[in-house]
Amino acid sequence: MRLALCYHTIKYLKARQVWARVWLWLRKPFERVPHGVRAPVWAGCRWRPGAPFQPPPGAEENPAPDVVRGLFRFLNEERELGWPPSFAPSDAPMLWRYHLQYFDWLWGLEYEQAKTAVLAWIHAGRPARTRGPARGTLALQQPTKWRASVSRAGTTNGVGLPQDHAGNVDPVAWDSYPISLRLMNWCMVFFGKFREPTEADAEFISHLWPSIYQQTRWLSRHIEWHLMGNHVLETVSALSLSASCFHSPKLARELTRELTRTSPNDSSGHDRTKSKTKSKTKSAGHGWHTKALRLLRQQLTEQILPDGGHFERSPMYHARIMYVLQMLANTGDPGLEDLVGDPLERMNKALECMTHPDGDIALLNDSVHRVAAKERKERKGDEADGEEHGGVDKYAVTYGPWALEDTGYYGWRGEDGSHVIIDAGPIGPDYQPGHAHAGALSFELSLKGQRVIVDSGVCTYEPGEMRDYCRSTRAHNTVEIDGQDQCELWGAFRVGRRGTRPDVQWDPGDAGFRLEAGHDGYLRLPARATHKRTFEWNRKNVLNLLDVVEAQKPVTVVSRLHLHPDCEIAEMSRHTAHVRFDTGELKITFEGEGELTVEDSWYCPEFGKKLPNKCLAFTVRAERVAISTRITPT
């Protein structure tokens, strides 16, 4: 069984992913962060940003007073790490340690505080050398007082790998994804927000620049081709941002060489030879720029769909990538600005559709709030900066039916605060479904500006009961058959067999819309069942659902609707429930040969946060099942 599951997972992967995974396994036992890397001479910053760089979403979660007292909060979990902080909390979950290594929290600090934190990461516990030239990030003189202060933060192994007080190395520090986000934060904070004091601080530059150089060099050799998806786009964006920041021909030469070698189009080696020939006539900086822009263009073309949606179908990662592209556009680099302009415009329009009237994203697939910024703000008479923070300008909002046909999301936005968001798209890219859930034909509903029917969200990325629940079909507003998920979910991010979705029939109009779609994810089961759902919506905010399940033998079908925790079931009968919420009431009626019950479920709008809520479950057992559901405001 396990071999079959692995086969049905691996068969969807690209050959490059498989080879990259094998190569990772082979080299990992022998690989070390390089010692004694000599950084080129600091030659200054070449950024000319058009506006101040903006903090990443969620940076405000750790205010400066808490950070300098050693209190750090990620994923709704607070830990005391001291100041300067210990960067290897071995008892913390992996994702918590990732967030610590991102350095988003740097944005709220004053210059001297931010400088202290970064120096602690670079040099904590490293013995000073008093002879010989400084070599990269290693042989750097440190005052006795400084060594004493950072010794409290833990130690390193001499190459910037943070350790705890017992000497245990936390490998998260040099994972490619944390390096990508850390590089972007360090560059934007010190060469954007604090550019003047940083450039006037030669001593700090002598520590900061070699570390940035080494991390950029390492990252260029460790692009996560085995994962692809948003990980590769973040890495390529970080390399583009870092390299556009500095006047460094040596860095340009090395990154040109590495990116030529790791380019997805470089399978035969001919492109590498051609690049070496060209490098004789072109400057190293131009060569790097060409390679970086080519990789970034390739990833944007692949990952940003024609309708503007991100191909992993996660509104959270969509918003995160929008933020990164906005920062690239703000560097003042004409090549980057031209490259990201069109994708940004399309993504902005798509994000509007995936955003509820409360200003936060839909929780489809792996999505939570507070990781992406407040996407849309309802503002009256206030032309605040929704656009510059990755938000959607209120003047761009359109009402009525909308469709992201490439992404597979459809819905309606009403001027009265109603919003329907339907997931009728594919699970994601077949070769990278790690952030997908078994929620085909699920939906979310807001009425009068308040969320009423909700997706369960995501509580954690750690393997276990809650990760399994949030990804499962029963956690979504769709139909579950015989207690099984629509696709084979395993591990924290793996997907085995998954169904296809027939053509969607989309019929929008001024008075509402009609959507018909289906999937065959249950054909793998003995009953070989299929599910088709029809949505009908009208301007009176009435939503009608018709679920038809056809199987070769009797199956147990459960249609679920998850209510927001603020909703209260005021009255319920065998087929009907009356639900109250802050701004109104609604009546939900199920028709069919079944019975309505109430289940306890979880609503997880943020990492590390699970709120109890109620779920209406209508259960029918038959060979052919038809369930009609009507949701009516009263």
Image (cartoon, grey):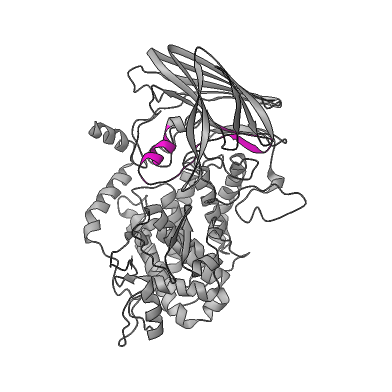
Q: Nearer the viewer, residue 143 or 305?
A: 143
Magenta span of residues: 444-472
Q: Position of residue 241 (x, y in %)?
A: 49, 62
Residue 345 lies, in percent from the top left, at 61, 48
Q: Nearer the viewer, residue 405 or 366?
A: 366
Percent x, y for residue 78?
Answer: 46, 58
Q: Tell me: residue 547, above or below residue 224.
A: above
| Horizontal relation, residue 395 to residue 435: left or right | right
472, above or below 286, in the image: above
Q: Residue at x 48, y 74 (%)?
A: 115
Quarter of the image where one finds residue 154: bottom left
Quarter of the image where the C terminus is located: top right
Farthest residue to the bottom: give it. Answer: 131
Could you tell me if residue 462 is visible in this image? yes
The correct choice, above or below, for 211 with respect to 329 in the image is below
Q: How many marks?
A: 0
Quadrant assignment, res 84: bottom left
Q: Residue shown at 43%/42% (left/top)?
A: 435
> Would you place residue 612 above or below residue 372 in this image?
above
Q: Is residue 283 among what the camera can see? A: no
Describe residue 441's horizontal placement relative to residue 492 as left or right. right
Tell which of 191 and 603 is nearer to you. Answer: 603
Q: Residue furthest right?
A: 381
* 449 magenta-colored: yes
Please say whether residue 122 is one of the residues in the magenta stretch. Answer: no
Residue 30 appears at what percent x and percent y? 21, 61
Quarter of the image where the N terminus is located: top left
Horizontally, residue 302 falls left or right of residue 274, namely right
